[in-house]
Image: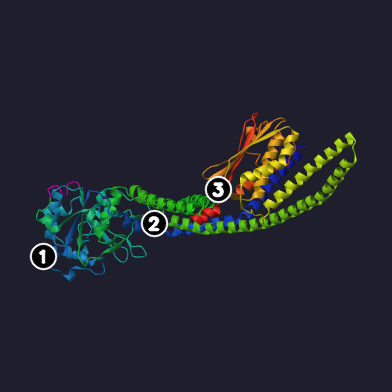
Amino acid sequence: MLQRVQKGSFQQYLNRVLHRSEVLLRYFLRQRGFLLRCLLCWAIGCLALSTDEVTSYDQRFKLRGDQKVSSQIVLITIRQSDFTGVYTKHSSLMDLDEATDITDSYFWNKRIWNQLLAKILKQNPKAVGVTLYFGDNIGDVHLNSAELGNFMDPRVFWSTTTNSLERVLTPAFSNRDHTNLGANELRRDEDGLVRRVFPQRADMPHLVEKITGKTFPTSLAGLPINFRGSIYNFTQYGLSEILYDELPADAFAGKIILIGAETSATPVYLTPLGTLTRTEIMAHIADTLLGNRWIQRLDFWWYALGFLFLMGFAIFIITTYPQSVALFFVLWIATLLAALSAWVFDSFYFWSPAFAPFVLLAATWTIFIGYQATKIERKNFALQQEQQYLAELEQLKNNFVSLISHDLKTPIAKIQAIVDRLLTQNQDQELQMDLKSLRTFGDELNRYIQSILKVLRIESREFKINKDAADINEVIEEALITLRPLAAEKGIRISTHLEPMFSVEFDPTLIKEVIINLIENAIKYTPAQGLIEVTSSETEADIKVEVKDTGDGIKPEDLDKVWGKFTRGSDQDLKTKGTGLGLYLVKYFIELHGGKVAMDSKWGHGTTVSFTLPLESEDVIEEML
């Protein structure tokens, strides 16, 4: 029994999983066009991101300009002119196979270097780094005790280099433990630019690590150097300024000193900021290490995930808002991301892409604007098909109603003729009453049919109004001649207050129909012995006609509804008969003339319905303008 229950539960669970999988599959199939476009946009953004790597820092360094650097770093630059007439070059002192940079030996002179180190050490600097290599390339060097104290001072660190066989070449002034040595190696990227510094082997730290007392964060791929601007950001002195005491007494106190050379023969390195010497690049590396300004970046997939959210937000904007608004928001987002990326990079040394998001947004805009255009085109086509179908349906309906209405008019006319003949031939009172009721019902049915035909006629596309100059008061009087007998049957008195006025252009037939409908409604909803007032007046811009009755009025919630087609007051369905087309036709006819209708009614105190007609038609006004 337990096995059967377990088997049944597993089967139900499996069925639910299969059902949900089927639902998801159907959803993806329906949305495959949209989802494939999303995937394409995301792939383009990720592709742009993959190319927006370390080289993207180059533009950042150039655009942001000079930044504040560490005041602890001081550069001493030895120029070729400082050694003119002092140094005699001996080619026998140089080993061309062992020396990496043969020009360093040009700047060697024991007396000058002893004076230079003595004056620097006298001000008690934190460390002195010599970026020049002085080893086998300067031959044997003999130092006395005073000179030995300067050259072997623990605050002075000498550069090592490597030969073509990657063997470390130690300088001539190395101590027994090699603790005063540091590698001055700089590696170029594939395009020849120096962008990164690489941690050296454990037995030979980098020269910058030795002079700063700090170590590089471990990184096999190299650490991007945070170039902070031109070399002129750093404090610099020349050799002659030091030898002739032309600098402040505390210029080197507690500072990190980097000594290098500047000459046209000295190799220079290409960097994102242009060409720099080895000493200048070392200064930027030291500044980055001292301020812990290493550029941080996330793994590729974190940025790709962020691109996914950015793409989704852009798609939401493009598919929700109009094209111009969406374009403004997309450009604003791209500008904001670029500004935010620059600010974060300059302030917190954190890299966030700027070019790749722009590519993503541009691709998303291009692809989904096309997608929106395709959707709109499909909707327009579907709308045209639907309009065609509705037009055919409307025509079928009109034909049907018109056919039925016309077919009903003939038998009704025959019935009314027979009733009239019977009324004249039979004098029986009871029969007379029945025949009169039959005649009344026939008239009502005829009016219903006539109202339906009017609605069909005005809703047809060929319907036009025929304006002519006429007197509105004459039209009112003609309507009253027709309706006074109907009012007399209920004992209702109709009073008129018609203000004399000039002729106005309107369609007399339609306006007469409007007035008849208003007065007929007033008669219908006014109790016996009631009063109806019809007034006309003229203002500077239009003429106004009012029909006021003393009926029960209309409930406030029904005031806006009664103008609709086949709509009547909620309390009138059982009291009076009607089609609900009268006020609809009134409003339609008046608005065709450019006029307005209004209704003022208080429950239990009667109703006033009015309309206005402009004195000048729109055509005349346009001609005058």
Q: Residues at badges 3 and 1 in contact (C-beta under 8 Å)?
A: no
Determine which quarter of the picture holds residue 548.
top right
Residue denoted by label 2 = 221
SS of the residue under disc 2: loop
Q: Is residue 11 visible?
A: yes
Q: Quarter holding the N terminus?
A: top right
User: Which residue shows up at 69% across the image and 31% down it?
Assistant: 530
Closest to the observer, 567 or 299: 567
Q: Depth-wise, is mark 2 or mark 3 nearer the camera?
A: 3
Most extreme residue toward the left, as rendered?
Answer: 244
* Residue 610 locus on image (x, y percent): 61, 39
* Residue 286 locus on image (x, y percent): 27, 52
User: Which residue shows up at 62% across the image and 56% down it?
Assistant: 379
Q: Amino acid at mark 1?
A: Val
SS of the residue under disc 3: loop
Q: Would residue 362 appear left or right of 599 to someone viewing this image?
A: left
Residue denoted by label 1 = 86
Most extreme residue toward the bottom, as rendered?
Answer: 91
Q: Which segment is the magenta one?
A: 248-254
* Residue 89 locus on image (x, y percent): 15, 69
Q: Would residue 524 appear left or right of 255 to someone viewing this image?
A: right
Residue denoted by label 3 = 615
Which of disc 1 and disc 3 is earlier in sequence? 1
Q: Amino acid at mark 2?
A: Ala
Which of disc 2 and disc 1 is earlier in sequence? 1
Q: Residues at badges 1 and 2 in contact (C-beta under 8 Å)?
A: no
Q: CA distance from mark 1 to mark 2?
A: 44 Å
Q: Amino acid at mark 3?
A: Leu
Q: Residues within 10 Å of mark 3 (few under 14, many from 20)?
A: some
Determine which quarter of the picture holds residue 29.
bottom right
